[in-house]
Structure formats: C-alpha cells, structure tokens
Image: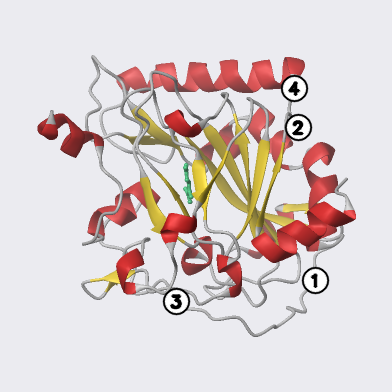
Amino acid sequence: MLTAQQIETYRRDGYLVIPRLIEGAQLAELRSLTDGIVAEARGVTVNDDLYDLEPSHSAALPRVRRLKPAIFKRYAFFRALTRDPKITSILTALLGPDIRFYGGKLNMKSAGYGAPVEWHQDWAFYPHTNDDVLATGIYLDDCDIDNGPLMVVPGSHHGPTFDHHAGGRFCGAFDPQASTVDVSKAVPLMGPAGSMTIHHARLVHGSALNRSNRQRRLLLHEYTAADAWPLMGVSNFDDFNDRMVLGKPSVEPRIVAAPVRMPLPAADHQGSIYENQRGSGHRFFETYEERSVAR
Ligand SMILES: O=C(O)CCC(=O)C(=O)O
C-alpha cells in the first residue's frame, strides 16, 4: 500500500519508485525465465511477435532489445505477474478499484550496447478517454546511473502532449528542442533489482544507451482505470474484458479533458517503440552505432 505522501508525490511529480517490491524466488524465476527466452533468440533472424532485435544482432552474437507483448500470452509466469496483488494493491491508490492491463513488454538494455529510448510520452501512443493511465517498470537488475536508468521529467504530466510525428507520420518520439519541456531537469529512477517504478502516461521520459558492463532489464506493464477507454478503439471486446486485473469492467467510459494527439497516420516502422523511433528525424541520445563510429 502507498502512504498519503507517496500518493501526493505521484500526483505532483508523476512518478514513484518502490524499492525491492519483487524479491527472493519470484525475482530469481523472473530473471532465469528471461535468460532462457533470450537464449532462444539465437535461432531468430528477424523481428517477430516476441523478439525485437538490436540492429547488430546475428545468430552468432544474439542481441535482443525487447521481449514484446507475446511474453504475456506465451508464459504463465509473466501473465500472473501482471495481476500480482503486490502490484495491484499499490495501483488501487492511484487508479481506483477497477483496473485493466493495457499491455507490456520487457526492455533489455544489454551491457555495453543496450539501445536508448528517445524522449516520449506513452499517452501519445495510446490516448484514452481519461488519463488515469500509468506504467509500472520492474527492474530485473540493479539499476544505477551507468546502466541506462529510466529518466523522467517531474511534473511534465501536467503539461501538453508533444508532437510525436516526423515527416507527417507518427514516430514515437518528440523533439525536446522544439518543445516547452526542459529535459535537463530529468531525474533517473534507480534501485536494486526487484524495485518497481511507476510513471504517469503523460510524463515525459526516455533513457540513454547502456555504456556499462552490466545489463539493465525493465519489465513494463501498462495499466488503466477500467473506465479509461482507448481512443483508438477496442478491436476485441472479450480480450478487453479478459485484461481486467482487479474489480469490474464497465461500458461507461469516463471522459475527462486531457490534451491528446492521435498516433496517426501510423509509424513507418511498426513493431515496437525502437522501430517507431527510427522514423524520428531528431535523435537526442547517442546510439551504439554512432558510438562505435566515434571511437
Ligand atoms: O526501457 C526504457 O528505459 C524506457 C522504455 C519506455 O519508455 C518504453 O518502452 O515506452
């Protein structure tokens, strides 16, 4: 459960870190299952519904950038974790008693080359009828300033939704120089393995290349209040209701004014945020490829 002060901090700043939420055997299983799934990427040559591969991936040198939403369909452990009471009991204080899992992924950020994620707001990807929408992130590894922590700009969830388009298409990132947000004010969210971050869907965030010799894996879950309905529509009503993790669904969306931009026309490069952001003309964070050339 959260204290009144943590709830106030979340409302004001748009984020929280809960140290060591996942521990012991559960953390060990999360890590070993992930290691096993990544090892199987050796046989994979192109991105599919499970693997998002680094540009430098090869069969000889497997490099996975992200495990995509298929992990929740294929692995009971990952599915169960989305509704673990340790997580959902915290979320009720922020989203109310009726909560839906929207989606998720596991970003790998491998030692030495794990890709950056450009500044963005999740809200630009999935606007809803109200902004009781957030993401949690569970660190599988100890995370400090050197291995690419999630960086957030405190309070930016109270501001505008920035333009995540380039060349007339959605690109999953905005140009901080062309925006009113000061990303130099960003703070890193760090903690020992098993710690959980929480960030509001409208909060500006991103993360740099992993320059350390330690990996930084982050399991992201997106959750909404059950009466926040996606403005892009509900394509499968049974699946929508199956994704309830707490309380009851409703067919009465709650509508609250919040600045939205629709992620349309869709990105040139579909598949994941890393693919989407290939379409962005303005890179803020250095990439592994740029770094290798510079050396
Ligand atoms: O993995 C990270 O550091 C950031 C991830 C993120 O913001 C996203 O995938 O939407």
Tell me which amino acid carries mark 1.
Ser
Disc number for residue 221: none
Tell me which amino acid carries mark 3.
Met
First-in-chain label (3 vs 2) = 2
First-in-chain label (1 vs 3) = 1
Q: Is mark 1 within 8 Å of ligand 1?
A: no
The reply, left or right, for residue 224 in relation to residue 279 is right
Residue 148 in sight in this render: yes
Disc 1 to disc 3, C-alpha distance: 24 Å
First-in-chain label (4 vs 3) = 4
Rendered position, 101 above or below 115: below
Disc number for residue 21: 2
Q: Residues within 10 Å of mark 1 (few under 14, many from 20)?
A: few
Q: Is mark 2 within 8 Å of ligand 1?
A: no
The reply, left or right, for residue 186 in relation to residue 200 is left
The reply, left or right, for residue 125 in relation to residue 18 is left
Q: Nearer the viewer, residue 144 or 67?
A: 144
Query: Mark 1 — residue?
Result: 250
Query: Mark 4 — residue?
Result: 23
Nearer the observer, disc 3 or disc 2?
Answer: 2
Question: Dot 4 lies on which element?
Answer: loop
Query: Mark 3 — residue?
Result: 262
Contact (Cβ within 8 Å) of mark 2 with mark 4: yes
Q: Residues within 10 Å of mark 4 (few under 14, many from 20)?
A: few
